[in-house]
Image (spheres, rainbow, N blue to C red):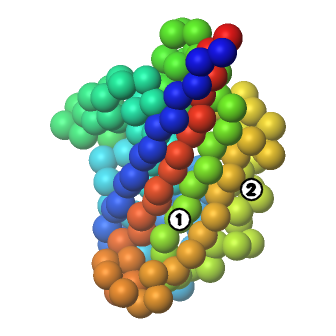
Amino acid sequence: MQLRIGNGYDIHRLVPGRALILGGQRLEHPAGLGLDGHSDADVLVHAIMDALLGALSLGDIGLYFPPDDQQWQGADSLELLEQVVALVMERGWSVVNVDSVLVAERPKLKPHIASMRSAIAARMGLAADQVGVKATTNEQLGAEGREEGISCHAVVLLQKP
């Protein structure tokens, strides 16, 4: 059996007038902010996609879903995740597990973790216990701490028989 590990990272600015979507779930930010980006700017799903692609040295999500390509304007990141998982499977690999950490001061993410995990697992063809989603603050330090943005770190383990 072969194993591969990939890691991913993403960050997007918080801005007024945009939806806040994390793990495919629409959340309410106390200041009415959302994530700015070409697609739905779901940093959690983007970090997972980059981890999947990185594990197989397939580049990053910008290669497959370029921000200057209008067909990806406002795209649902969970749909893009399905396409990335298909690329992994086409090459004979399967996902063992995903682990991720969201970094945000607000909103409080703990009440939404289970629904995020379920949505991601469903789109990846995994059980919810194969998808880890954790959340932390940045203790008011850095861009996340000043509520200028939200970031996410993710790691995946792939196997090939």
- In the image, 102: left or right of 11? right
Q: Position of residue 7 (x, y in %)?
A: 45, 44
Q: Residues within 10 Å of mark 2 (few under 14, many from 20)?
A: some
Q: Residue at x 52, y 80 (%)?
A: 137
Q: Quadrant of the C terminus?
A: top right
Q: Quadrant of residue 60?
A: top left
Q: Residue at x 36, y 25 (%)?
A: 57
Q: Is residue 70 at all visible to an observer of this figure?
A: no
As drawn, the label of residue 115 is 2
Element type at mark 2? helix
- In the image, 56: left or right of 28? left
Q: Quadrant of residue 96?
A: top right
Q: Residue at x 33, y 40 (%)?
A: 73
Q: Residues within 10 Å of mark 1 (few under 14, many from 20)?
A: many
Q: Position of residue 20 (x, y in %)?
A: 49, 64
Q: CA distance from mark 1 to mark 2?
A: 14 Å
Q: Position of residue 129 (x, y in %)?
A: 80, 46
Q: Tell me the amino acid under the disc marked 1.
A: Leu
> Of the residues tagged 1 and 2, which is closer to the observer?
1
Farthest residue in the bottom direction? 140
Q: Is residue 72 above or below residue 20?
A: above
Name the one closer to the observer, 152 or 35: 152
Element type at mark 1? strand
Q: Tell me the amino acid under the disc marked 2.
A: Ser
Q: Which residue is mark 1?
A: 102
Q: Quadrant of residue 97?
A: top right
